[in-house]
Image (cartoon, rainbow, N blue to C red):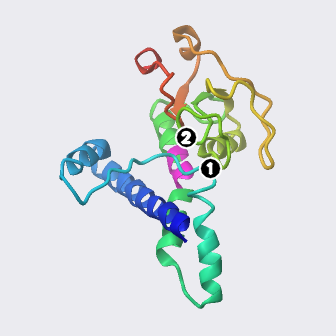
Amino acid sequence: MTKLLENIHRAVNIGLVNEMKIVADKMGIDIHEVIQAAATKPFGFTPYYPGPGLGGHCIPIDPFYLTWKARQYNVNTRFIELAGEVNSNMPTWVIQKMTTALNDRGKAVKNAKILVLGIAYKKNVDDMRESPAVHMMEMLRTSHADISYSDPFVPIFPKMREHKFDLVSTPLTAEKIATYDCVLLATDHDAFDYKMIE
């Protein structure tokens, strides 16, 4: 129960900040500035940051063990389920934002060359379990995009239960990046040279 509480605490707070990201985006507000300002409170606030969804096992899966068990006791776990819903919808929201950005530049997702940066589920690891990057790659493939990826921790796309891509990690050079219509940052590994990428 202690581990589940810790996992659920993160899931709910990440769900909250992901929802706040969507609201702030609609209002033209930088959510990162908001989080930075809120974090100046000396106690009572723990900063969480928005992202393209959740991966691994602890946050997207483990909380639902408690949801399942709670049902046996006729208890409805609304916070857990709502957080899961918000977090599960983030890959779709990111792809919609990317699609709009391409459309604004007169480019369709179909046949667009898209480079996904980082396919591990969190920064600086090689763990691919439940990676939101892979869910976004699936959506892009369904839309007939020409997908590549770059991840210093995942040189070859691994065999996975539900996902199959015949891809290897693309080396990042300014010349190579310039050949893409869109670069989608999915996992912000420290090894990425963001100034060069930009």
Q: Please state the horizontal and vertical placement of residue 104, each as a whole percent of the image.
A: 45, 35
Instruction: Label 1, secondary structure: give it.
Output: loop
Q: Which residues are magenta?
A: 89-95
Q: Quadrant of residue 198?
A: top left
Q: Which residue is mark 2?
A: 122
Which residue is farthest top? 175
Residue under circle 1?
A: 56
Residue 136 in which image quadrant: top right
Contact flag, marks 2 and 1 (Cβ < 8 Å): yes
Q: Residue furthest front?
A: 2
Report the number of discs: 2
Labels 2 and 1: the sequence-earlier one? 1
Residue at image location 55% in from the left, 11% down from the top: 173
The kind of residue on which mark 1 rests is: Gly
Furthest residue toward bottom: 74
Mark 2 neighbour class, 10 Å CA radius: few under 14, some 14 to 19, many 20 or more: many
